[in-house]
Each structure stands twice: as structure tokens, then as C-alpha cells.
Amino acid sequence: MAYNKRIKNDVKRLAGAHSSLILAKHFVPFSTALTYYGRKMELPKFKYYPDPIATGVFEKSDDICECCSKAKGYIYTSSFYTAQDVKSICPWCIADGSAATKYNGSFSDDYPLIKEGVDLAVVFEVCERTPGYPSWQQEIWQVHCGTACEFHGDAEKEDLECLAGDELDTFLTKEMVDPEVWPKIIQHYEKGGQPSVYKFKCTECQEIVFYMDYT
Ligand SMILES: [Zn+2]
Ligand SMILES: [Zn+2]
């Protein structure tokens, strides 16, 4: 209630402002004001995607979600596999599964998870109720301890520099990278560049799992 009052007062104050200069300086677009002051707009939590803001998969936007027909303040920016033409989906319609159901779509490929024997309930949660991640090729959601990992975005350069010993050997073997080429890859590595290295974390044993992707 107090918040709504505040918006009303803001609008009143703005309506009374005479100088357009003042307006330009202090004007908060009404939709933004609603997002910030009017509603509790905490983003939904995703078990397998803990920080979607940091990875940029949700962006602030006034666009209307095609699924719920509301402008919730955030729009999903990554892949959605569906036969239908869908451009804007909000995080809430991903989290509650309504976008996947409505458009008979998925945000990630379920095959890599099913192939590893991941519990089907987890497969559905990752593919139908979790944002996807942008990748050069078909993304492969990583599996550890028999279940889906959390996605943590592009690896930091320091993450890769710290890889050593058995951990590095396992990674290079898995990604079929020549150990002699690896220092060069690290040297030129940039987040979002070529190749991309994505960081996952096991939800059971907390081990960090890297996955490399090229065009
Ligand atoms: Zn929505
Ligand atoms: Zn594990």
C-alpha cells in the first residue's frame, strides 16, 4: 500500500513539474516504477541455474511476455526450442513450466541428460523449467554424480589457469584437447569467445565441471 502511494505521489509531483529539464532528470518510467516500487518482483529461483542475471540470460525489459501477456520487467534472452514463433518469455513462465507447456517447447536438449541416466523428473526440470544457456553448438547440460549440474556461465580465465593435475587431465581427455595446445587456449581465452568454456557445479559433490564449446 505504501509503495502504491509513493508511485501516486511521484506521478503527482511529476505532473506538477514545469520544466521539461526537471522531468528528464527525475522522470522514472512508470513501468520501471511499478517494477521497483509497486510489486514484489523477486526473480524465481532455479535449482540448476543459480544466477541467471549474472550470465545475462534474463535482461531487464518492458517487453510483454507472450505466454502470460504481462510485462514483468525481465525477458529471457537465450534459446527456446519450439515449432512456434515465440520471441518474448518472462522468467516466471519458464519457472512454472507454462511456457514449455503452452508452446510444447524446451530450453535445453534432453538427450545428453537422458543418455547419462539422469532421473526423468530432473531432466524435465532442466529442460522445461530452467533457462537454457547460449552456446556455439547444441548445448550439452553437464552431468555429475548421476544428476544434472548447476550452470554457472562462462568460466573465468583464472578458473582455467587453476586447472591442474588429474582435474586438468580429465578435462582435456573429455574435450579431446591436446595438452600441448592447452596453454595457448588459456592465453587467448575470453569469456564468450572462441572456444567457450562453461562452468558447471555438481549439485551432489560440489565438484566443478568444465565444458568446452567451439563453433
Ligand atoms: Zn510470462
Ligand atoms: Zn558430483
Image (cartoon, rainbow, N blue to C red):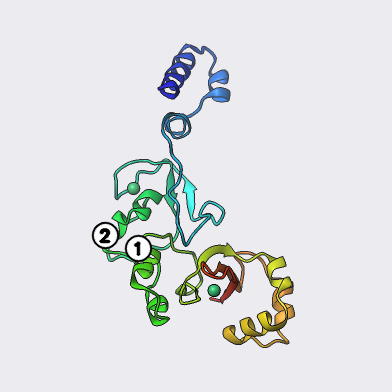
Residue annotated with mark 2: 101
Q: Which quadrant would residue 195 be assigned to in this image?
A: bottom right
Q: Residue at (33%, 53%) from the top-left corner?
A: 96
Left or right: where 188 falls relative to 206: right
- Mark 1 burial class by Cα count in 10 Å: few <14, some 14-19, many 20+: many
Sequence-wise, which precedes: disc 2 or disc 1? Answer: 2
Q: Position of residue 165 (x, y in %)?
A: 72, 82
Q: Position of residue 66 (x, y in %)?
A: 30, 49
- Mark 2 burial class by Cα count in 10 Å: few <14, some 14-19, many 20+: some
Q: Residue at (27%, 62%) from the top-left corner?
A: 84
Instruction: Indicate if the residue with disc 2 has its beta carbon within 8 Å of ligand 1.
Output: no
Q: Residue furthest front?
A: 205
Q: Are marks 2 and 1 in contact (CB under 8 Å)?
A: yes
Is residue 209 placed above or below 29 in the rendered structure?
below
Q: Residue at (44%, 21%) from the top-left corner?
A: 2
Left or right: where 75 falls relative to 68: right
Q: Quadrant of ligand 2?
A: bottom right
Residue annotated with mark 1: 128
Q: Residue at (56%, 63%) from the top-left corner?
A: 153
